[in-house]
Amino acid sequence: MAQINPSILSADFARLAEEAKAVEGADWLHVDVMDNHFVPNLTLGVPIVEAIGKATDIPLDCHLMIEDPDRWAPQYVEAGAGSVTFHAEAAAAPVRLAREIRAKGARASMALKPATPIEPYEDLLPELDMLLIMTVEPGFGGQAFLDIMLPKIRRTRELIGKHGLELWLQVDGGVSATTIERCAEAGADVFVAGSAVYGAQDPAAAVRELRAQADAVTAAAPWACGH
Ligand code: DX5
Ligand code: ZN
């Protein structure tokens, strides 16, 4: 079944506990950590992740858009994140870092910016629990979905099949009712949605509707056989 991860980047930062409750039924809460160096925006860090984790039962999917994740990522596991995503472009030693995240008890995930190809990372995939393909340039919510990323999603899905991996394939950026089906058809199974969820009248209903749309496509997808 498709997983829908609302991004709190589009939520009201002064009411994060209530905003987490507003998406009850979501699979994970996507928390965008930005350091104003790796991306030109600044959001939140370890203490706020810890506070959000205490305020909700939804597991936290922390997306670290920061430099030097080798140094900082383990702290997000300690803060209570169930999944920690670092960027391939920022990690000095991605294998060591993924192993450290797993050893500390969280799911290890690696993200690729739009211009970063998947192919150089083929041999690393068994070290990961999730691969995140950015479908916008990271840094801001509400940007337009990049259709040019669909071939990369497809190629990644093929690599997952080729190696028989239990790897989740996440997309993040511009995912909405108009683009989620394209992502699901290409092979994504975890969908981050910020503005499409928090911009909706009823965010929890938006989560259910997005999941139903993705599931309908996945049910017919050849890559999902026996999924
Ligand atoms: C962008 C963030 C995304 C963002 C997505 O850099 O990583 O998680 O919140 O927002 P939407 O869904 O509005 O594109
Ligand atoms: Zn994100």
Image (cartoon, rainbow, N blue to C red):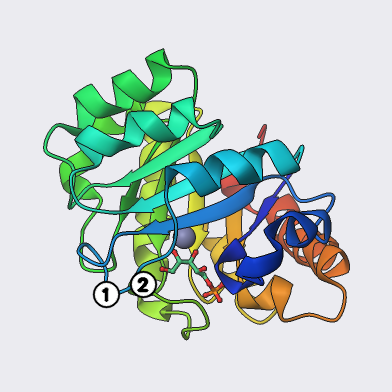
Badge number at residue 139: 2
Residue 211 in which image quadrant:
bottom right
Discs 1, 2 touching: Cβ within 8 Å: yes
Query: Looking at the image, which residue is at 49% across and 25% down?
Result: 106
Is 37 situated left or right of 92 in this image?
right
Tell me if the residue at label 2 has its CB under 8 Å from ligand 1. Answer: yes
Regarding residue 188, the answer to whether it shows in the image is: no
Query: Looking at the image, which residue is at 28% across and 37% down?
Result: 72
Q: Nearer the viewer, residue 102 or 42?
A: 42
The N terminus sits in image quarter: top right
Residue type at tag 1: Pro
Q: Residue furthest top?
A: 103
Q: Position of residue 166 (x, y in %)?
A: 51, 28
Residue type at tag 2: Gly
Chain-order first, disc 1 or disc 2: 1
Q: Is residue 96 above or below residue 191?
A: above
Tell me if the residue at label 1 has its CB under 8 Å from ligand 1. Answer: no
Q: Nearer the viewer, residue 145 or 83?
A: 83
Q: Position of residue 121 (x, y in %)?
A: 21, 40
Residue of label 1: 40
